[in-house]
Image: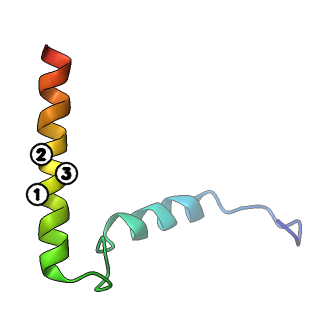
């Protein structure tokens, strides 16, 4: 840190907790686009899973 103060060990955990419950797109993407992305990602996961088995 610039001011040479020790880092509170609780601080990184607090940041992580705050980010875990944050909405993914925060209203910057339309609901239809989110649905398209989820459908596409689901298909990609399924394809990768099948490829690992084959």
Q: Nearer the viewer, residue 53 or 5?
A: 53
The quadrant in which the C terminus is found is top left
Q: Tell me, yes or no, whether the two marked residues, 1 and 2, touch with CB atoms within 8 Å.
A: yes
Label 2 CA crowd tier, 10 Å (few <14, some 14–19, many 20+): few
What x and y, as percent, mark residue 50?
11, 25
What x and y, as percent, mark residue 3?
88, 72
The residue drawn where x is 41% and y is 70% is: 18
Relative vertical location of residue 38 with respect to residue 26 in this rendering, above or below: above
> What label sits on residue 39 in the rendered view?
1
Relative vertical location of residue 18 with respect to residue 53 in this rendering, above or below: below
The residue drawn where x is 18% and y is 42% is: 44
Q: Tell me, yes or no, whether the two marked residues, 2 and 3, touch with CB atoms within 8 Å.
A: yes
The quarter holding residue 35 reads bottom left
The residue drawn where x is 62% and y is 57% is: 9
Give the SS element for disc 2. helix
Which residue in the structure is indicated by mark 2? Answer: 43
Label 3 CA crowd tier, 10 Å (few <14, some 14–19, many 20+): few
Label 1 CA crowd tier, 10 Å (few <14, some 14–19, many 20+): few
Q: CA distance from mark 1 to mark 2?
A: 6 Å
> What label sits on residue 41 in the rendered view?
3
Q: Is residue 9 left or right of residue 20?
A: right
What x and y, as percent, mark residue 25?
31, 75
Q: Nearer the viewer, residue 30 or 1?
A: 30
Q: How many marks?
A: 3
Here the colouring is rainbow
Give the SS element for disc 1. helix
The quarter holding residue 49 reads top left
Q: Nearer the viewer, residue 3 or 25?
A: 25
Q: Nearer the viewer, residue 44 or 24?
A: 44
């Amino acid at each position: 840190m610039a001011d040479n103060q020790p880092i509170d060990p609780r601080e990184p955990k607090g940041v992580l907790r705050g980010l875990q419950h944050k909405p993914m797109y925060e209203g910057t993407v339309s609901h239809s686009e989110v649905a398209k992305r989820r459908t596409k990602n689901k298909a990609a996961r399924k394809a990768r899973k099948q490829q690992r088995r084959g």
